[in-house]
Amino acid sequence: MTNKSNLEVKQDGMIVLHNVNASWPKLAKPDGIEGTPEEDKKYSIQALLRINDATFQDFKKAIAAKLPKDFGKPSPDKLPWREVNEKLPEAWGEVSAYRITMKSKTQPKVFDGKGVQISPESVRAGDLVSIAFNVWPVSNKFGSFIQLQLQAVLRIKEDLDFGGTGPNVDAGVFGLSINPFQGNTKTDEFNDDIGF
């Protein structure tokens, strides 16, 4: 059994991932790997989805639906998501996840749960967020790849502890059995019949 999907495709084609955990938010100023020229740096955020989450299944289908019919199969290193199983929150237990990356050359707007625009610095790793983005498929002499253009971020609430200054305590301290995920977190229930 997988969780209910939190993905929405808007009428204008924009995609929204609702209620996902933020990772590596770079929303206050553009960033890039060492040596990246200033003009090539981008604002970015990553969404973490556990590997058997229905949202990721629907995410891949929504991306595939936006690709041109003659779009080649992107190589794995040119996809905007990676499977990760390290540096995940301790509360997740032994689970793999997908880290989905959205980027933009222009600074995205950031809102709080009431829709009021807030400082981009308000979003921290582990926060529960919703992320709006567009799909940009590219096919050239270097191959086919997909970029997700970041549009806006909604900060819902502080959620997971990614090792900040606060204590990493959950309700297990009160003798409760904690299982933050529904279903079997060790099994990938996604049948990949999409071409990437």
Image: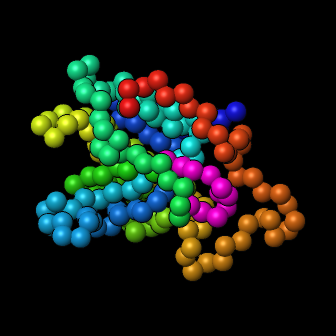
Residue in the foreground of this view, choosing between 168 and 90: 90
Q: Quadrant of residue 143?
A: top left
Residue ID at (78%, 64%): 171
Q: Position of residue 47 (x, y in %)?
A: 46, 51
Residue ID at (56%, 43%): 51
Residue 38 horizontal side relative to residue 46, left or right: left
Q: Quadrant of the C terminus?
A: top left
Up the image or down, 167 lies above or below 129; here it is below
The magenta stretch is 88-98
Residue in the foreground of this view, choosing between 17 and 87: 87
Residue in the foreground of this view, choosing between 78 and 134: 78
- Number of residue marks: 0
For this orientation, the residue located farthest to the right is: 175
- Asked if one can make out residue 54 in the rendered structure from this viewpoint, the answer is yes
Q: Position of residue 161 (x, y in %)?
A: 60, 68
Up the image or down, 38 lies above or below 83; here it is below
Residue 142 horizontal side relative to residue 164, left or right: left
Residue 117 is a magenta residue: no
Up the image or down, 164 lies above or below 23; here it is below
Q: Quadrant of the N terminus?
A: top right
